[in-house]
Structure formats: structure tokens, C-alpha cells
Amino acid sequence: MIGAASFDNIVAIIIFNICFSIGFAEAPGGENAGGSSLLVDLGIVAAQLAVGLVAALIFGFCMKIFNRWPTAKTNLAKFLVVVFFAIGWPILCDQLNYTTAKYIFIIVFGYMCFRAWGKDKPEKELAVLWIFIQPCLFTTIGATLIFAKIDSAMVGYSVATIFIGISCRCIIAFVVTIEKKFTFKENLWIALSWIPKSGVPAALGGLTLAEANKRGNPEY
């Protein structure tokens, strides 16, 4: 479930970035507004994905070096390395304007670390860090809401949209997991546990508006 949820987020983010890049490249005042080939945009995105994938495989494979020493002596070092790459690589990609590369790198690098370390991964250390990081993450997203600018007439439509989305997600998650190895209660649990997956859409939701404001494109 955790692996599927993470991979689902990565797929959604990659698709969003493809549409985001192409949309603004073709927009009035964009890089390709003059009629450049759409294949060029897709090629750039594919190159970014390739860079992120190759880098994750290389750095992830190098994590096997920690297996030379006892786990008790390497857990802290593993923890620091994982945090370094988790924070440092996205910053580097943003600076190089290779934003799509960071998403595929994070998920593949994490998987490679698991393949290299198995049960000897710094799970407890990361869990403690997440206790402090998670509130900061969600309060930052919540802080972007400016209630004074929300049209009260749109509140009902917004609630309806959320309800429809959650309902569709629950139904689909329930249907695709109908197998003999799962009981009805387990299918139901999977469907309900999929509801809180909203952090990524909330984080991405304002990027289009922010980019449109940055470019001075009122239509977008």
C-alpha cells in the first residue's frame, strides 16, 4: 500500500509536469509560442526522467558500501545520507531547471536503498524526523489559502468536487483490489485508506496560477 501510494504520486507529478511544461511553452509569450515542435518539449521531459533514473540507480547502488560495517554503526550515517539526497537533489534540480528529474530520482533512490539495506535501513530515525516534518509540510500548504479571496458561492461546488473525487477514488480502489486473497473488510480498508492522499494535489494546485502570474498571462 505504501509503495503503491508513493509510486502513484510520482506518476501523477510526472504527468502534471509534462502538461505544465508543454502548456506554458505553447502559451502566448512561451518558449514555443512561435510554433516549435511539441516533440521537443516531450524530448526534454524524457531527458529529465532519464537523468533522474540513471542518477538514482547509480547513487542507490553505491549505498551497498554501508553493508561492510555492522548496522549499529552505520544507521546514523545512512539516515544522514538519505536526508541529504532527499533535500539536496530537488534543490539541485530546481537550480538546473531539471524539475521533473527530482521526482523519479526520489522514488527510485529510496527503492534502491531498500534493496541495498533490506531490514537494516534507518527506519526509526526517519520516523522521528517525519514526526516533525509532516506538520510543517501540511501547515505550509494550508497557509497558502487566502480565505478573503474565496468566493462564497464556490464553496458548495468545491465540497461537491471533493466528494465526487473521493467517491470515485474509493470505488475504483475497492474494485481493482477484488481478489480471492483479500476479504471484503480488507478491500474496504484499502478503499478507505486511499482517501487521505491529497497532499500532492494540494501542493501542485497553485503552481499553475503562480506561473501564470509570474509570466503576466491573465488568460492562463
Image: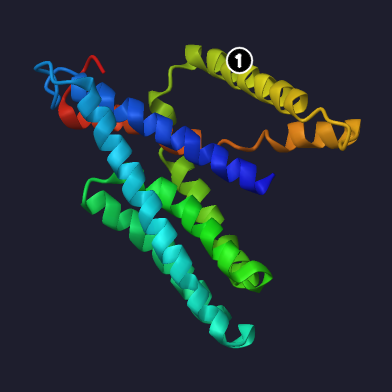
Instruction: Identify the image quadrant of the C terminus.
Output: top left
User: Is residue 146 in view?
Assistant: no
Dividing the picture into quadrants, the one containing residue 135 is bottom right
Q: Position of residue 71 (x, y in %)?
A: 62, 83
Camera-nearest residue between 181 and 155: 181
Q: How many marks?
A: 1
Dividing the picture into quadrants, the one containing residue 215 is top left
Which residue is most to the left?
34
Q: Position of residue 109 (x, y in %)?
A: 47, 58
Q: Is residue 198 above or below residue 51?
A: above
Q: Which residue is mark 1?
A: 160
Instruction: Identify the image quadrant of the N terminus.
Output: top right
Mark 1: amino acid: Ala
Q: Residues within 10 Å of mark 1 (few under 14, many from 20)?
A: few
Residue for point 40% across, 62% down: 58
Residue for point 43% across, 58% down: 57
Q: Is residue 197 above or below residue 65?
A: above
